[in-house]
Amino acid sequence: MTPSVYKRILAVLLPLALLAALGAAVALHLAEAPGPDSYAGHTVLINEVCPKNLTGIADADGNTGDWVELINVSGEDLVLDGWGLSDDPDRPFRWTFPEGSTIGGGANNILVIFADGQDYFDGTNLHAKFSLARTGETLVLTAPDGTTVDTLEYPSMEYDLTYGRLAGSADRVGVLTGPTPGAANSRDFLEETVLPADWGAVNFSVPAGFYDEDFQLTLSSDDPDAVILYTLDGSVPDTDSPVYTGPLSIESRAGEKNQYVSLPTVLYDGWLLGYAFAYAPDPVDKATTVTARLWKDGVLGEEISVQTYWVGVDAGSLPVVSLTCEADDLFGPEGIYVAGQTYYTMRKYGSENPQGNFNGNEKVDGRLQILAPDGSEAWQAQTTVRVSGGWSRQGVKQKNLHLKLQDDATSGILDAAPGGDALDTLVLRGMGNGTVYPALHQDAFLSNYLYDLDIGCQYNVPVTLFLQDEYWGVYTIRESKNTDFYERHYGIQEKDLICPGTTDDETAQPEKSAFGLGVDALDATTPEGEAWVEANVDVEEYIRYTIAQMYTYNADGMYNGGNNSVLWKSSTIDEDNPYADGRWRFLLNDLDATMIDYQVDPFAYLLENDFSFANCENSPWYSVIDNLFQKLWQDPDFRQRFAEEFRAEMATTYAPENIGPAFTAWADLLRPETQRDLDRLKVDTTPLAPLVRLFDGSGVTGWEMSMEEWEEQVDTMNEYLANRADVMLRYLDQYLQEAEGA
């Protein structure tokens, strides 16, 4: 074939080939594009999620937070009032969309929600009251009737990456090529290598524990081709971390300057106080945490191996908890443990009540270890960490920490609690407000004592906490009072549980309000009133609960308008379950402001104050419980029933010969650890204190206590326990006589 002929053939065939190729490309594009049936069977999907947004989109206040994106594929505008979005499939209504929330069905069919723990509308974006874990979670979207609309499980993710559905697909999910908040997702995934791989664990030559002398630690892997990356600061190793090349020297850190425990982590009226005072001024005991993971073929391993070592440190007499996170996640400008950027931003815009980062509900990733003092038991788990509590968040250095474990099993330390060997949520609780008996942890003592007598409380185990390898003091591990708590203790599943503050408030709060109005209208002296009480209240349980509140004189509970009191019930009736009878029950909660004065009158507050709905409706602690007692006391039959149980409880549960030795055992348990605990809580002035007082008018803050003063508090408590029952009986007789005389 001559060149000229060849050229003439190409001139004909080439355009045809190009046309065919173009047609094929168009067809392929059309096949990939979202068609009318691409999302068949769906209404709204969780379209994209960014579990660690550092440099991406910002909210109306300029903050970058984690975010979740929804897409409406129904073709119609949808009202989202009462819909639930959650990062916990067992709690589908952890956050509900506020009234007026909508998502379009046409061009504006994508909605972005910041999952940063804030729970508000910033004028542009909704903010959910939970945050996301970078290590992976399952998101669930729920319709108001409880129907699961969609779920999305995402894996451990690197910063600024997103996980979601390919455009036009309901089923194909993965790490997307780039974040597209508010717009259609990409049609391609990043290579699978961006996700951690199962390379196995790193082996440690020495187990976690307490050692008298320095030693050499060897790290190894069962895979000879894997590289070991490690850190010594609590962070998770990445490709910028040191490469293990030989034994690590684990040495005593005695005398090292404090890095974290001395940071100002409280909010007072005077914001300059952090510069005026030094917290934990003396070097505290320190540990060394080695965190390691494998790296191979350019891919990080998914398993994080952690061991903590103490050299030359007394293990003490209590179980030891080691908790490490990324340091900045706790103490950086956006850290959850400090006032941080949130406080200064609120001050900048003139807020009258500035809050700190610690007032939010953002959670961060952490690694938890629990060790017996003698080293006989060591247990660890990946966890998420957030600050919990009320006022103590901003006024107490020992913040309460809520832990959501990645493994559904805990150390045997909690075996004494029902289901304690399979708890997936724990609370590390400090001394609370510490307003009465600092460092005695009477909240935990009372909870445990009453718990053993089947009065509704949470179980506690005293421990010492090392946070970021620094001694943080005595804490207690407490089972979380979440929906699982009610299922473990009472056999009530979440779908049947009504508990304001724990379950969906869209249902729970109206139920509580209805109960409160019923109490307000109650005449317990009539047959109708008695019938209403028996139908709505477990009276026997209520009496024991009330006696416990009276005996302890819970100043931050029943005696503060019902603050820190928990009401709950089952929405369904199950004849085989005595707790599933549709009646309201009560739990003791937060007993740190108790047993102040054994002579205080427990009846006067409850019987002489106005707890009517009209007087309490604007109170955040609307006192249904206090009002109920006042109404029931008018009924002679109730008074007799109450008096009989009251006297029986004073002769048994609260008899000095019973509760006294129990407290002695508790004090004996804490005593060996107390001096170190008190040293950690010291506050000293700095050279800047005079200048701060000049500009801010602030005085000395904090407190310092000696062991002698602590022992005096023990004596005061013993005096309370020795006399309170007799005083209670005298008050009972007095008010019975007054009631009968009336």
Image (cartoon, rainbow, N blue to C red):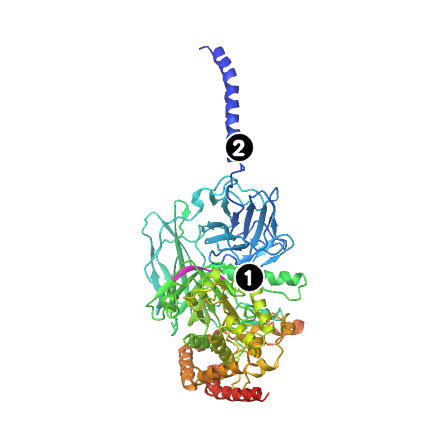
Count residues near mark 1 (Cα–Cα under 10 Å), then give few for <14, some for 14-19, many for 20+. few
Picture disc at residue 30: 2
Towards the viewer: 626 or 102: 626
Q: Position of residue 132 (x, y in %)?
A: 51, 55
Going 48% across and 88% down the picture, which residue do you hit? 726
Q: Position of residue 390 (x, y in %)?
A: 55, 69
Give, as a single range, the part of the protein colored magenta: 380-385
Towards the viewer: 599 or 704: 599
Is disc 1 placed on a helix, strand or loop?
A: helix
Picture disc at residue 507: 1
Can residue 401 be seen here? yes
Where is the C terminus found, in terms of image quarters? bottom right
User: In this rendering, is residue 462 above or below 53?
Assistant: below
Q: Position of residue 264 (x, y in %)?
A: 55, 68
Kindly give the residue lying farthest to the right in the view shown. 350
Where is the N terminus found, in terms of image quarters? top left
Residue 288, by quadrant, is bottom left
Going 49% across and 11% down the picture, which residue do you hit? 4
Q: Amino acid at mark 1?
A: Thr
Classified by dominant secondary structure, the portion drawn in magenta counts as: strand
Q: Amino acid at mark 2?
A: Leu
Residue 522, by quadrant, is bottom right
Determine the CA span between mark 1 and mark 2. Answer: 46 Å
Can residue 702 be seen here? no
Is disc 2 placed on a helix, strand or loop?
A: helix
